[in-house]
Image: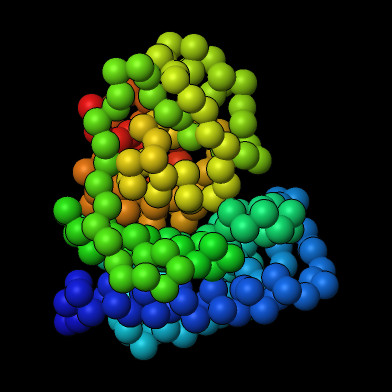
Amino acid sequence: MVDDTALAAGIREAALAAGAAILKVYASDFRIAAKADASPVTAADEAAEAIILRHLARLTPGLPVVAEEAVAAGHVPEVSGGDFWLVDPLDGTREFISRNGEFTVNIALVRAGRPVLGVVLAPARELLYLATGPGRATREAQGEAPCTIAVRRQPDEGATVVLSRSHRSPETDAWLAGVNVARQVDAGSSLKLCLVAEGSADLYPRLGRTMEWDIAAGQAVLEAAGGSVTTLDGRPLRYGKPGFENPHFVARGGS
């Protein structure tokens, strides 16, 4: 059995390889197609997922992988409550298309319904977050050595709230009416969870549709940094749900 340290190193390597492939497409005059749910997809999504799947097959042969593009094509493995991987090869395709750099590669290991290891890579920003367990969340920026990150205590003047750049909802605005908000920041992809994890923000409410692969790696990073992700009624967000769709949730830093 591969230990968690080796697994974390393996998914970091997989994410970097996928990120390199994404940047090749990013620099080209790429085409945009639509999936069955009308969401956009590019050659970068498909190339990155193929690379990650090859890496995971070598790293953990036989372990189920729930990957966004494979699921869209009808390939849904049986997870049955055991360990499995969740992969979003290119989270923030709309950000990729608009070329604002706020897109990520996401790989997470789910164990007993919780994401326990995860990597979030923003290839256009040369930024990588890695979670290897409680108290072990790191940030690597532009080739620098990894540094440990942790959530912050919310300032007395109010919360910095990070919100989806592409998926803001009226329900989110209604929820925010009950929060002492000092500042709002818009961001794309799973970077929102990582901003809370590194102490740059305090809250990320998401009252809109997300899938498990969208947030599992970011949740692993946030929880390793001391934060939490819960449903609106305060229950821990669980994984391996039928259809892999999430309820509305709130990501929080320190109290």
Q: Give the residue drawn at x 79%, y 71%.
A: 30
Q: Quick check: can you spot residue 40?
A: no
As drawn, is 250 to the left or to the right of 235? right
User: Is 196 placed above or below 108 here?
Assistant: above
As drawn, is 227 to the left or to the right of 217? left
Q: Give the residue drawn at x 39%, y 31%.
A: 203
Q: Give the residue drawn at x 33%, y 47%.
A: 198
As drawn, the residue found furthest toward the top would be 178
Image location (x, y in percent) of residue 202: 36, 32
Image location (x, y in percent) of residue 116: 25, 58
Q: Give the residue drawn at x 42%, y 83%.
A: 55
Number of callouts: 0
User: Is 102 placed above or below 155 here?
Assistant: below
Q: Quadrant of the N terminus?
A: bottom left
As drawn, is 148 to the left or to the right of 179? left
Q: How is the image coloured?
A: rainbow
Image location (x, y in percent) of residue 159: 38, 24
Image location (x, y in percent) of residue 109: 32, 64
Q: Quadrant of the C terminus?
A: top left
User: Is 91 placed above or below 62 here?
Assistant: above
Q: Quick check: can you spot residue 204?
A: yes
